[in-house]
């Protein structure tokens, strides 16, 4: 009798729960040994990884996958290098598990503090990017969690090849294979099962398009760490160094169009717009970026008329909306109204402006004189990230090791009884 999707996912969930107890008590040295061995396995399997990825890319092209998704899907030599570096960097990071802080004596004589512990089993649902498999696996492993990885059907061959390398690392460190499990079926019913198994799964992290994340948020019976969009802004203030601002804005948009930290809207203070926009627009046009602007923008440069929808759009493509604003107040108002609370940056040499911007912009990452594409766990020193959260509970911004743990209270006594004061 063929196993149903629900039975299959239940089997994975049960195995993950059992494995979570093993990895939760594993030593730092054992976890690091698994990570280093997985990095060595990836390095040795470059040809296999590339061949598997070519199968996915060919299928993607045949199925009319959008260019932005094809770009995310590609496992280039640089991205394989990045996965290897990420594994080694996570291995070098301090292990948060078991750290105890703020132990203090209470009037009763007991001591109270907090210990950092793994979340347990983390389900990760993602699209296109096969490198997420290694990022998620490494962070979950180091933070003492078991994980169930459900990648998109478009990356199934790549994900299987990567998973094989992870399994080699786990075996070398004598850890259960179920610490990291990649869902083998491409049946979408697997997602529905994964997000409704609170007895086996403690947290879900969806990484993908708005449709996926809205569905997971709506239907999950398990807590979700998520962000919907990356509508990121760069505000060029009246006090900006304009050559610096041009470099920052250009990098924020063109570093990679398909990442959630790419700038989608450029805000320019009306005091400098006439000096800033013409040469900035020329650079974007030379790169092939389509410009959409407000009326004041179009009075300065040639651009398509921006609509209300443009301010609410994450393009993930060589398209940029531009608005000329009256000043800092209007820039902050625009970002808080239209932004996705992901990442926003101000370019300014005025300390007062930058202080107000970082205090009043309600985003997970707020930057000064920096392109928004720096919003990345690797760049933040987290080794890698499992995602970028725009939630305020329980993690916000790039989610690394600490975001995959929580704290429990530790209470130490010596026979004290409640109602009796310490002598």
Image (tube, rainbow, N blue to C red):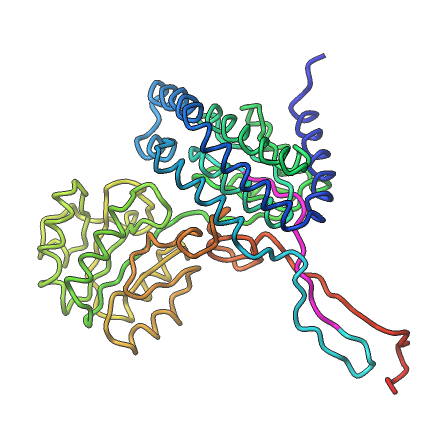
The N terminus sits in image quarter: top right
The part of the image, by quadrant, that contains residue 128 is: top left
Question: Picture coordinates of residue 18 (x, y %)?
Answer: 74, 38
The part of the image, by quadrant, that contains residue 374 is: bottom left
Residue closer to the observer: 154 or 374: 374
The boundaries of the magenta stretch are 112-124
Residue shown at 23% from the left, 73% from the top: 349
Residue shown at 40% from the left, 35% from the top: 80
Q: Is residue 206 above or below residue 294?
A: above
Residue at the bottom extreme? 423
Question: Picture coordinates of residue 110 (x, y %)?
Answer: 81, 76
| 215 left or right, relative to 147 | left
Q: Is residue 148 above or below residue 1?
A: below
Residue closer to the observer: 48 or 226: 48
| 300 left or right, relative to 312 | left
| 96 left or right, relative to 320 | right
Residue closer to the observer: 127 or 55: 55
Residue at the top extreme? 1
Q: Is residue 400 above or below residue 49?
A: below
Q: Is residue 116 above or below residue 181?
A: below
What number of labels is visible? 0
Would you say residue 11 sits in the magenta stretch?
no
The C terminus sits in image quarter: bottom right
Q: Which secondary structure class fits the magenta region best?
A: strand
């Amino acid at each position: 009798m063929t196993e149903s999707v629900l039975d299959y996912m239940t089997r994975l969930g049960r195995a993950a729960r059992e494995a979570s107890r093993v990895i939760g008590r594993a030593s730092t040295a054992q976890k690091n040994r698994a990570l280093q061995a997985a990095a060595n396995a990836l390095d040795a399997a470059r040809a296999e990884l590339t061949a598997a990825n070519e199968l996915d890319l060919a299928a993607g092209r045949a199925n009319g996958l959008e260019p932005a998704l094809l770009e995310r899907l590609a496992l280039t030599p640089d991205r394989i290098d990045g996965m290897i570096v990420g594994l080694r960097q996570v291995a070098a990071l301090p292990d948060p598990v078991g750290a105890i802080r703020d132990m203090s004596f209470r009037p009763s004589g007991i001591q109270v503090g907090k210990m950092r512990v793994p979340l347990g089993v983390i389900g990760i649902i993602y699209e296109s990017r096969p490198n997420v498999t290694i990022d998620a696996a490494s962070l979950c492993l180091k933070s003492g969690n078991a994980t169930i990885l459900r990648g998109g059907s478009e990356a199934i061959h790549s994900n299987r090849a990567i998973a094989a390398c992870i399994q080699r690392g786990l075996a070398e460190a004598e850890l259960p294979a179920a610490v990291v499990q990649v869902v083998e079926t491409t049946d979408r019913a697997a997602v529905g099962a994964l997000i409704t198994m609170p007895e086996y799964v403690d947290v879900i992290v969806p990484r993908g398009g708005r449709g996926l994340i809205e569905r997971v948020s709506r239907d999950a019976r398990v807590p979700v760490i998520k962000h919907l969009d990356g509508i990121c802004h760069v505000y060029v203030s009246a006090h900006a160094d304009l050559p610096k601002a041009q470099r920052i804005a250009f990098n924020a948009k063109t570093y990679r169009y398909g990442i959630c930290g790419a700038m989608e809207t450029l805000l320019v203070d009306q005091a400098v717009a006439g000096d800033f926009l013409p040469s900035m627009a020329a650079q974007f046009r030379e790169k092939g970026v389509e410009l959409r602007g407000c009326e004041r923008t179009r009075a300065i440069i040639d651009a398509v008329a921006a609509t209300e929808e443009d301010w609410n759009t994450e393009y993930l493509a060589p398209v940029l909306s531009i608005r000329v604003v009256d000043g800092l107040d209007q820039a902050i108002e625009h970002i808080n109204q239209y932004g996705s609370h992901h990442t926003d940056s101000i370019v300014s040499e005025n300390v007062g402006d930058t202080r107000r911007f970082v205090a009043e912009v309600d985003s997970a990452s707020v930057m000064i004189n920096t392109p928004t594409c720096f919003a990345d766990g690797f760049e933040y020193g987290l080794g890698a990230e499992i995602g970028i959260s725009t939630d305020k509970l329980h993690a916000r911004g790039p989610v690394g090791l600490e975001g995959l743990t929580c704290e429990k209270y530790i209470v130490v006594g010596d026979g004290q009884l409640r109602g009796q004061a310490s002598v």
